[in-house]
Image (spheres, rainbow, N blue to C red):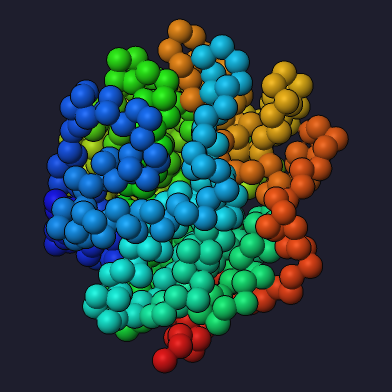
Amino acid sequence: MRYISTRGQAPALDFERAMMTGLASDGGLYVPEVVPVMAPAEIAALAGLPFEEAAFRVMRPFVGDSFAPEEFRRLIGAAYAGFGHAARVPLVQLGPNHFLLELFHGPTLAFKDVAMQLIGQLFQASLARSGGRITIVGATSGDTGSAAIEAFRGLKGVDVFILYPHGRVSEVQRRQMTTPSEANVHALAMDGDFDDCQAALKAMFADRGFAEGVALAGVNSINWARVLAQVVYYFTAAVSLGAPHRAVSFTVPTGNFGDIYAGLIARRMGLPIDRLVIATNRNDILHRTLLTGEHRKEGVTPSISPSMDIQVSSNFERALFDAYGRDAHAVTQDMASLRAEGGFTVGQGAIEQLREWFASGRASEEETAAAIARTLATTGELVCPHTAVGIHVAEPHLGEVPMVTLATAHPAKFPDAVEAATGIRPPLPPRMADLYDRPERVTRVPNDLDALQTLIRERIRP
């Protein structure tokens, strides 16, 4: 299995090298040269399996020779051993043909754990073989950072630096990043918004001297291994609801497009997905793109669903690459226009393809709060604001085909928004009950690339 860049100028890599590299040297994102297809009988055989075994069968064709089968099985088992639910990603029914897929039972109470816990195991195994060390730099709108820190804290051969927008994450999200005491993790509160953090991250990868000098690696959703791990729960959820003999739809709250792109990969692998619905909050660039064909930034407005406060959705580049028939030149031109002019017009054939693959919708702040309250009143389920965005957007698409809305975070990660909507302040699970009492360790940093690179060089452990 080989991986190629969406911009066509980087060398093709195997799974392990693509994972360890993160962003391609030409600024593009790695995608599989060929997407393996699972036969209907193989999909049906996933029914009733433990999540770990289903994960092994879905992901194995993408891994190639990078990890031996038994080693890969062992790493998957270690990744999910710490989850707080025996099913790992259980389904809960909200109403007729409407289900929640709970993705928040990992150590940081967010869907990012499903991928990040596995990446931590894979990175550790790879570094143990090579004897090397790496510097992980990540940008987060709230959840990726804590998931990355949890996955890599205390590991030998790894230094972790997480950029998050100062004042634009919830208190729980911030404390999950700033309270770990291990010397190899560093929480950096950057002036600006998430797009500024993500732009700084991409600039570090583009600076080949810096990237090679610190052995830079990325674990944002630009990393293909992140997307691959998320493909698994589309299969487990759909099979639980009757696939491959029955089609299933999914609504996905998304900001950086990685989670819903994983759904597109699942469909291309043969999973009978009827609709993939993009759910956005007030920062609705993805919804606007499908409506108008214009992909144009309008600035980031803070919301009660902060993990979706994004205007530069990195993984959208992967979908564009596929929609353009894998025309790397067309993708490169669009990405250059996005940087220079703040947007671009999607080619006619590509926008028609995207509209065939995806539906979309948006939820205002008021609609999000109303969905939190309505869900509690009608089902007894307390949901986070991001999940509520998904529920609101899913409702017009409900029908005969089962709809699965992805529940991306535990409500306790956003207690203020949930309490404002319902009058109930969701408590943290017992294992995190002392989170507000733990001392914080954080560095405030400017939106300045040189200053960031200097700080990282100074803090890397010998």
Is residue 279 shown left or right of residue 347? right
The quarter holding residue 206 reads bottom left
The quarter holding residue 379 reads top right
Give the farthest residue toward the bottom: 462
The answer to which of 22 and 281 lies nearer the viewer is 22
Q: Position of residue 257 (x, y in %)?
A: 42, 42
The residue located at (65%, 57%) in the rendering is 173
The quarter holding residue 370 reads top right
The residue located at (43%, 12%) in the rendering is 401
Give the farthest residue toward the top: 400
The residue located at (38%, 80%) in the rendering is 157
Q: Quadrant of the C terminus?
A: bottom left
Is residue 432 shown left or right of residue 51? right
Is residue 249 shown left or right of residue 269? right
Q: Is residue 288 in sight in this rendering?
A: no
The residue located at (42%, 20%) in the rendering is 241
The image shows a total of numbered marks equal to: 0
Q: Is residue 435 in sight in this rendering?
A: yes
Vertical order, 95 against 39 (above or below): above
Q: Position of residue 135 (x, y in %)?
A: 40, 76
Is residue 259 shown left or right of residue 376? left
The answer to which of 226 and 202 lies nearer the viewer is 226
Vertical order, 120 against 257 (above or below): below
Q: Position of residue 229 (x, y in %)?
A: 36, 47
Give the farthest residue toward the right: 423
